[in-house]
Image (cartoon, grey):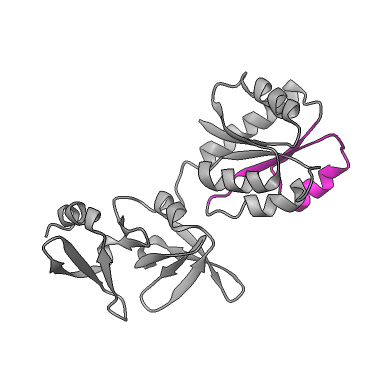
Amino acid sequence: MIKALLVDDEAPARSELRYLLADHPDVQVVGEAGNSREALELARATGPDVVFLDVEMPGLSGVEAAPLVRERIDPPAVVFVTAHERYAVDAFAVEAFDYLLKPVDPDRLARVVERLRERSVENVLPVEKVPVVSAGGTELLDYDQVHYAQADGDYSRVHTYDRSYLCTASLGELEEKLPAGRFARIHRSYLVNLSKVAGVRRTSPERMRLQLADAQKTELDVARRQVRLLRGRLGV
């Protein structure tokens, strides 16, 4: 299933696009937004695979909003929808997936959807890397390098054996990406690689603390509601 978010300040334009997408059963419209601010909030909440984004909107334009929409660990495809073909160059300058001219031609939309299907198939094979900010660029960490991740506002901080990095994905987004068999959300602020747990200490009958095998021998408290589940997974 391809999850789509529709963004246009004109409700009739959104309704028309929703109507045309209904001819493609594997496309699910997960939300609609009338401006870029709403679009950014919905993109975080729904995790769409594609955002159909109007170019000309009051406030933040579609071209300006596109890089913000794509600030995810697995960014959605952005398809610009515009009444003016001259915006095609701007679209590809911000790494847009494609663009559609208004009024949207059903055959042209069908070709875009077919490309989105191909993109979805390509993304089925997991890439076991976490992109983090390093020295003004991006470094890719293997999953096994991650000891734990910590919430840091809208972002997160990823900790390895002896370093920490800023990650532009939220802790919730990291939880979705990292394999559940290896990682566990032990607290609303912490996600832990269970293979890096070196010890467990009971702090009360209903509370426990994990000691990690990093350079600092970090200790993290487990939320009360997670204790029973975590004890079972660790066999303690």
Span highlighted in magenta in the image? 74-101
- Left or right of residue 211, residue 142 in this image: right
Q: Is residue 152 above or below residue 63?
A: below
Specify whether 89 is left or right of 189.
right
Q: Nearer the viewer, residue 172 or 74?
A: 172
User: Hey, which quadrant is residue 116 in on the image?
Assistant: top right
Q: Nearer the viewer, residue 220 or 93?
A: 220
> In the rendered image, which quarter contains the C terminus?
bottom left
Q: Residue at x 75, y 46 (%)?
A: 62
Q: Answer above or below: position of 173 versus 34.
A: below
**Residue 23 included in the magenta stretch of the image:** no
The location of residue 112, given as percent across then percent down, is 68, 31
Q: Quadrant of residue 2?
A: top right
Q: Nearer the viewer, residue 115 or 86?
A: 86
Quadrant of the image occupied by residue 151: bottom left
Identified at 30% across, 55% down, the residue is 182
Query: What number of labels is visible?
Result: 0
Residue at the spot 61% in from the left edge and 39% down from the top edge: 50
**Image coordinates for residue 174, horizontal then vertical, percent:** 44, 55
Q: Position of residue 44 (x, y in %)?
A: 54, 48
Measured from the top left, where is residue 167 in percent x and y?
Answer: 51, 64
Q: Residue shown at 58%/76% (left/top)?
A: 135
Residue 75 highlighted magenta (yes or no): yes
